Image (tube, rainbow, N blue to C red):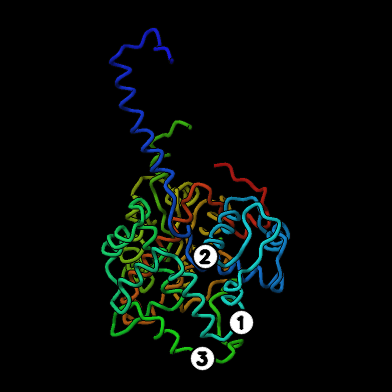
Amino acid sequence: MARRPRNASKGEEAKQSEVAPKVEAALRKKRSARSFPASTFEEPLEFAAAVLRIGSGQPVKRLTLFDQLGKSPESGNSRQLIVNSGKYSLTKGGVQADNIELTPDGHKAVDDQINARERARVRVELAITGIEPFQKLYEKFVGNKLPAHAVLIDAAKDAGIDPEHAAEAVDTFVVNLRFVGLLKTLSGAERIISIDMLLGDLPAASSATVASPVARAPSTSIMTSEHAQFESTCFYIAPIGDEGSEPRKHSDLFLGSIVEPALEQFQLNVIRADAIDKPGIITRQIIDYIMRSRLVIADLSFHNPNVFYELALRHAVKLPIVQLIRTVDRVPFDVNQMRTIQIDTTDIYSLVPRIDSYRAEVASQVRRALEADHVVDTPISTYFPNMTVNL
């Protein structure tokens, strides 16, 4: 029988007995598992494509695979990649397995020799209908216009997804829909189309010459008030331009219609350089934000030289970053190994119907970037893994 501490009163014991269940409940909530993969479908699909490329369809030694990819097999990112690829049923073999191999469907999903219709069918099954909560959401809304984000979150909770993870599930679901082709712009709005409609538009013949989405890839100390400020900040690197110029209008549109709405759920304050109102040398303040903010979002549109200069600084410190670009701009070679969200601004009819799914894609990338065990892989960290920057 446990003894009561000599100085502890019965009142204190009662208080402790009341607190303990609350602490236990909080820990259970923190440990609650996702009922869906912890990433969108595209990155695990690229991983599966690498398994096919490196192993020619045969199982590949896990250590050899990550050596060929230039990644540490024991890093948090690499382990999560294996887990997510397994949850999407693309590959077999866990984080400690000797070998990683493609599942039969995983092979079909990445093999360009498989006809386009069959490959699309398999991808839909792996990314949407094979994930129970995503299947429920799809069945509920197929044939309809993409609902508002709040409506999708309510539907996700009704589908049994933990409320803690509902927003993440919705973002992942929407990005996956668009990636596999089930989200189409029809009659001026993004609509969730049927699988038959998707497959009916694709050729049944061999599709070795049909472009594959995979081809796009060649990602307790005392806190001071200043530290707290940066911890709650997302710095937005963008081609600002003069008032009334096309770059300024573009930057304002992306900031107000895509970036800020996507970051609301993360409670981050978005700062752009022209909004810095502290007295002092503006360049020093910009560099402070670049090097110390919890998150940076960089818009590479217009190939603005200042943007790339600032982007290189963020790459050097290896802190969370998300990259955006207009589809009319090419992602430069030096940074194209970093995942970059491409936004179609060809005209208002291309952009407006897809605003919600662009927000979801940004939110999904931000969520991944802010995960505690996420390791930022940049061109600089790839070639100089031991380089450190003292802030």
Q: Identify the element where label 1 is drawn.
A: loop
The total number of labels drawn is 3
Mark 1 or mark 2, which is nearer to you? 2
Tell me if residue 302 comes above or below residue 36 in the rendering: below
The residue tagged 2 is 88
**Left or right: where 382 falls relative to 318:** right
- Say few, some or many: other residues with alpha carbon within 10 Å of mark 1 (under 14 / 14 to 19 / 20 or more): many
How far across and down, in percent of the image, does residue 143 sit? 31, 79
Closer to the camera in the image, 306 or 9: 9
Which numbered dot is residue 112? 1
The residue identified by callout 3 is: 203
Q: Is residue 104 left or right of residue 368?
A: right
Task: Check disc 3: other Cα within 10 Å, few if <14, some if 14-19, many if 20+.
Answer: few
Where does the image place residue 102, in percent across and percent down from the top left? 63, 68
The amino acid at mark 3 is Pro
In the image, residue 129 sits, relative to residue 390, either above or below, namely below
Q: Which secondary structure, mark 3?
A: loop
Three-letter amino acid code of the residue under disc 2: Tyr
